[in-house]
Amino acid sequence: MDRLKNVFFYLEGPQNVADFQKLCGIQIFTQKASEGLNGYAASATKTDNGDAGKHSNNYELRHRDIHNGVSKQDDLSENISSSSKNGLIPNGLNGVCHQTANGLVKNGLVRNGSQSHESVCKQTDKEEVTYKTNNKLVHFLFLFGAALGNEQFYLVFFPFMMWNVDSRLLRQMVIVWHVGMYLGQAAKDVFRRPRPASPPVAYLEKRYVTEYGMPSTHSTVGAIIPFSILFVSFNQYQYNFTFGLTVALVWTILVGCSRIYLGMHTALDVICGILTACMIMPVLLPLVGTFDYLQVTHPLAPLVTVLGSFILCFVYPPVKEWNTARGDTATVHGIGGGISFGCWLNHYLGFMYAVPSGAPYEINIPSAEWFVLSLVRIAVGATLIAAGRQVAKRGSIRFLCYLYGQDRHDIQVQRQLKVETPQKFFTYFTISVGASFLAPFLFRTIGIHRETFYTEF
């Protein structure tokens, strides 16, 4: 039992992340300067992975500084940890202070010390972490793996699948992706488990530092996307299942390992993210065909897919301080609702119609014509989406700030629930309707559309 506890604490702690980073060729340096809390001296030293987590006293508080352009040096911060009833810091560190983007600090009763949950973490002891990547091949491989779960990937991969491959396959995968992202993002703000502490971890990706860590939603979608595509496509197309399964496994592992490599998640966060996908997919995948047919053909479908998605943006755990998770969740709802509504419009206006199925279809080697038309569709569609994004984003911020009588240039105003959530939803809803309805209509008008687009439901 003690061995299992030790394994669990190692998986949830930051040392497994630092060890993996070191194994992959990242050299970490920690620079300590100034005077520590309660008079403990913090001499200027540099340490590598093996020494970064050591301290002279269990009561010494270490400070995690996030350089995201928001935190302020002079902030005096305190915050009562809500991770557990007794205020324990979830990752088991000896008094790690976690500084968030707005200067607030989460601290609590440490496992091996007696610091109370009401103590104030002063910014008098500063530790800055720098790093050097010694293996460029591994570095770029994991950057690619992390990109498979980012917003930019969705904006490229989803339209490409719809315009050039199979719109039905995309719609059904997006249903599972939508649910997985919503549950995963909400779970972060329920469990409120912090990111791996730095030091000993080096942050190679700063955008998500202000979010909580468990579960890893990158890992969740890193499993949902390839395995959903595998499930939906296997009965539609003729290909080797072992090959498809291998691709899905490599995709999932690459995304999960990338989150540890970049210092964003512990191994336990990644495991929980994959387990989240494993719980969702067996429930939804057998029903996803029925859900997809209803969202395309039912007269009242938008009341569920669009209005329901917008309402779910506000059915979200309350947050004590701002982070990117809530806005990203609204983005997910906007994408899911927009794709559904765009395809419903295609059917409602008579563009999309059913044809007898000839599945499973043989997969042919793409022709030169397919490549050329795909590139043209991407260029035309991307231009349309980019223009729509700018108009929708700026227009929605202006309207909401005018409605509430607030300054649209104030970053704190933009982060308010009543501004950020509808702005994110409307922006990505507009983009998705453009990708699923306006762009295919434009392609058809100028004669570059994919022949089977309007028959895939």
Image (cartoon, rainbow, N blue to C red):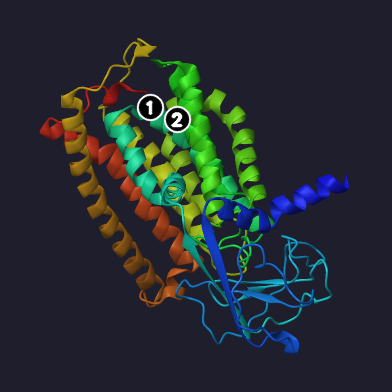
Which quadrant would residue 391 be assigned to in this image? bottom left
Which quadrant would residue 37 be assigned to in this image? bottom right
Q: Which residue is rendered at x = 53% and y = 84% of the image?
A: 73
**Mark 1: which amino acid?**
Arg
Percent coordinates x, y for residue 154 in the rendering? 39, 44
Query: How crowded is the residue under tag 2: few (<14 C-alpha within 10 Å), some, or many (20+)?
Result: many
Badge 1 is on which residue? 168
Residue farthest to the right, as pictured = 1
Q: Which residue is rendered at x = 76% and y = 69% of the image?
A: 94
Badge 2 is on which residue? 172
Label 1 to label 2: alpha-carbon separation: 6 Å
Percent coordinates x, y for residue 29 in the rendering? 55, 69
**Which one is in front, 373 or 426?**
373
Residue farthest to the left, as pictured = 446
**Mark 2: which amino acid?**
Gln
Specify whether 273 is left or right of 86: left
Specify whether 280 is left or right of 90: left
Q: Which residue is rendered at x = 24% and y = 40% of the image?
A: 438
